[in-house]
Image (spheres, rainbow, N blue to C red):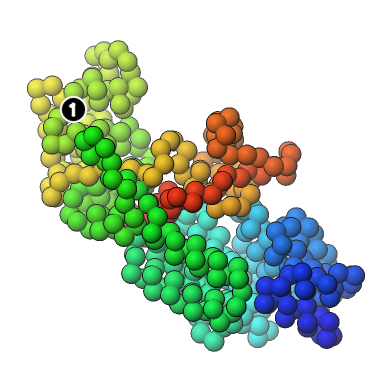
């Protein structure tokens, strides 16, 4: 490695992308192309960065496995920043194995951290937690240690483990201070700010109360029957009943919980669950069937009893609470993903939300009509953005499964 390449690499490690570019901007050898690609990625020019990294990878010979593996890792991070989540993770895993075998432990861990962050974006928190648990971050550069701790903090926050999340953020702050990279410090500060922002609303007769993440965690551990409209399920103590794929049952459970300790009229339940304005005997028969299914599903959490005019829920815990998202609307999770400040493709959004691409496209058109999102680019290069939701945290709206699911 010549002195100019070494100086450019040191500038990149310190977060000085412009300083790195000044040294290699006029060079076209593979090492310089790779450094230029990384610098362009740090500046947010992701398509150009990917092009440079691919040119660099082609430029390295067949015997230069180590630099080619580094280019694969850098390109994978660019793809993550571009929210292109549909690619196979095999090439990244192979690059990590090559780097590990050649003694480049730092870049091997970097590759594995990229894989964990991809799993987080897809909402596959159990797989991400398992992968992160097998990583050994001891003795790594401070910048990588900070990324590892930030990833651990996000995992803990998604599972509402507030204590471990705060501890991970403290370690991330220490590592970011040692790294002296402003972008890392800003990322840690943003993660800390999420703890103080409203994360959900507790609904009650006549109004609502905003709750922080720690208050949501305390509520879930209170022993009350919680109808969680953020994650679409019911919880009482350690027991969890997901209803994300059973919207009719969840609508019935929420209507009964909002009225507790009073009952709910049958016609009101039919309108809430089925959208029928003029209920008939067919609707009433269907209501009885769905109530029976709900009663069977949540028997360990609550009883549902028939009354003269409808039905009433009787929780086995200390009471019933409805936990609503901090923002209203059917597209809350979509807005939560878009509010991270990155430009998403419809295919990436569809993967993260486990929905069809056509469904996501229709939702985006509706949100664009309402001025909540905007698009950039055309055709296959089209990407979607939304203004950051600075007043709230979207942790509970991101696609994920609670650990007790």
Residue 38: name its quadrant.
Answer: bottom right
Q: In this picture, is 265 found above or below 84? A: above
Which corner quadrant of the image does residue 283 belong to? top left
- Residue 231 or 60: which is nearer the viewer? 231
| Left or right relative to 367: residue 127 | left
* Residue at the disc numbered 1: 264
In the image, residue 199 sits, relative to residue 113, either above or below, namely above
Q: Position of residue 213 (x, y in %)?
A: 34, 57
Q: Position of residue 384 (x, y in %)?
A: 63, 43
Residue 253 x/y as whole percent:
25, 36
Residue at image coords 22%, 44%: 321
Q: Nearer the viewer, residue 333 or 311?
A: 333
**Along the horizontal axis of the image, is 70 left or right of 175?**
right
Q: Is residue 401 visible?
A: no
State the image coordinates of residue 184 (x, y, percent, origin top left): 57, 70
Question: Which of the 4 image quadrants contains residue 63?
Answer: bottom right
At horizontal 62% and vertical 80% (from top left) the residue drawn is 106
SS assignment at label 1:
strand
Binning the other alpha carbons within 10 Å of mark 1 as few (below 14), some (14 to 19) or many (20 upward) gives: many
Report whether 344 appears left or right of 159: right
């Amino acid at each position: 490695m010549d002195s100019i390449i070494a100086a450019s690499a040191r500038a990149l490690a310190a977060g000085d992308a412009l300083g790195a570019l000044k040294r290699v901007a006029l060079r076209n050898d593979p090492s310089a192309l790779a450094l230029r690609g990384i610098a362009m990625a740090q500046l947010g020019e992701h398509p150009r960065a990917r092009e440079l990294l691919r040119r660099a990878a082609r430029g390295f010979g067949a015997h230069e496995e180590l630099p080619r593996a580094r280019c694969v890792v850098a390109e994978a991070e660019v793809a993550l920043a571009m929210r292109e989540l549909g690619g196979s993770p095999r090439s990244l895993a192979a690059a990590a194995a090559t780097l590990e075998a050649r003694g480049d432990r730092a870049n091997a861990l970097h590759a594995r951290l990229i894989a964990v962050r991809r799993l987080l974006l897809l909402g596959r928190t159990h797989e991400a937690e398992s992968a992160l648990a097998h990583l050994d971050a001891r003795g790594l550069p401070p910048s990588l240690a900070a990324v590892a701790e930030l990833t651990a903090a996000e995992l803990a926050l998604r599972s509402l483990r507030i204590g471990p999340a705060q501890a991970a953020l403290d370690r991330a702050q220490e590592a970011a201070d040692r790294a002296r990279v402003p972008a890392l410090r800003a990322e840690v500060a943003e993660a800390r700010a999420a703890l103080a922002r409203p994360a959900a609303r507790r609904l009650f007769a006549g109004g609502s109360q905003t709750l922080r993440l720690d208050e949501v965690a305390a509520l879930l551990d209170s022993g009350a029957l919680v109808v969680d409209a953020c994650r679409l399920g019911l919880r009482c103590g350690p027991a969890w009943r997901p209803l994300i794929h059973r919207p009719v049952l969840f609508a019935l459970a929420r209507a009964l919980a909002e009225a507790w300790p009073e009952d709910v009229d049958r016609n009101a339940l039919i309108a809430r669950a089925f959208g029928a304005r003029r209920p008939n005997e067919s609707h009433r028969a269907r209501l009885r069937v769905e109530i029976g299914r709900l009663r069977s599903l949540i028997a360990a959490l609550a009883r549902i009893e028939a009354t003269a005019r409808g039905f009433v829920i009787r929780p086995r815990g200390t009471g019933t609470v409805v936990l609503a998202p901090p923002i209203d609307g059917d597209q809350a999770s979509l807005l939560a993903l878009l509010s991270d400040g990155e430009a998403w493709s419809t295919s990436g959004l569809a993967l993260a939300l486990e929905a069809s691409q056509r469904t996501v496209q229709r939702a985006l058109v509706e949100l664009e009509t309402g001025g909540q999102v905007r698009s950039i680019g055309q055709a296959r290069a089209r990407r979607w953005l939304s203004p950051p939701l600075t007043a709230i945290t979207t942790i509970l709206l991101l696609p994920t499964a609670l650990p007790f699911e």
